[in-house]
């Protein structure tokens, strides 16, 4: 897990990579949880903004690891408005840097 905080704006990004050992997830089933996008390496990624306080982009790599980038403000306590939201493309650009 990597966590970044901009102390001036209180914006935060978390980058989390994990792997479920018992039962690997099927990406086709996971697509039910967000809008699908394609990363630079042709991996499917899914954007989710179900809560008004955070945005997330996540994907599963070929080794079965799930990676997530989560964006929020002030410890996930502030509702995101049009000015504070990141575009999906900004999250995709961040994800592409991790590939």
Image: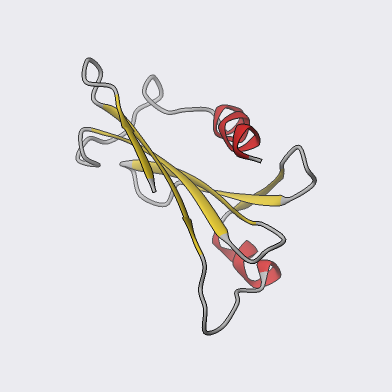
Determine the residue positioned at 35% across, 49% down.
Answer: 51
Front position in the image: 40 or 35: 40
Residue 9: x %, y % from top left: 25, 18
**Residue 73 appears left or right of 70:** left
Determine the residue positioned at 66% across, 73% down.
Answer: 26
Residue 61: x %, y % from top left: 67, 57
**Residue 27 appears left or right of 40:** left
**Residue 72 appears left or right of 35:** left
Residue 37: x %, y % from top left: 69, 45
Indicate whether 60 appears above or below 71.
below
Indicate whether 94 appears above or below 67.
above
Residue at the bottom extreme of this rendering = 22
Front position in the image: 74 or 60: 60
Indicate whether 47 appears above or below 73.
below
Residue at the top extreme of this rendering = 8
Residue 99: x %, y % from top left: 66, 41
Determine the residue positioned at 57% across, 34% down.
Answer: 88
């Amino acid at each position: 897990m990597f966590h970044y905080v901009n102390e001036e704006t209180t914006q935060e990004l978390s980058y989390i990579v994990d792997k479920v050992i018992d039962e690997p997830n099927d990406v086709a089933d996971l697509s039910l949880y967000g809008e699908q996008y394609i990363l630079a390496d042709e991996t499917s990624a899914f954007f989710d903004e179900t809560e008004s306080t955070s945005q997330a982009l996540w994907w599963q790599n070929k080794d079965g690891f799930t990676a997530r980038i989560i964006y929020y403000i002030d410890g996930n306590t502030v509702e995101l408005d049009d000015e504070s939201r990141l575009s999906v493309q900004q999250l995709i650009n961040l994800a592409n840097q991790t590939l």
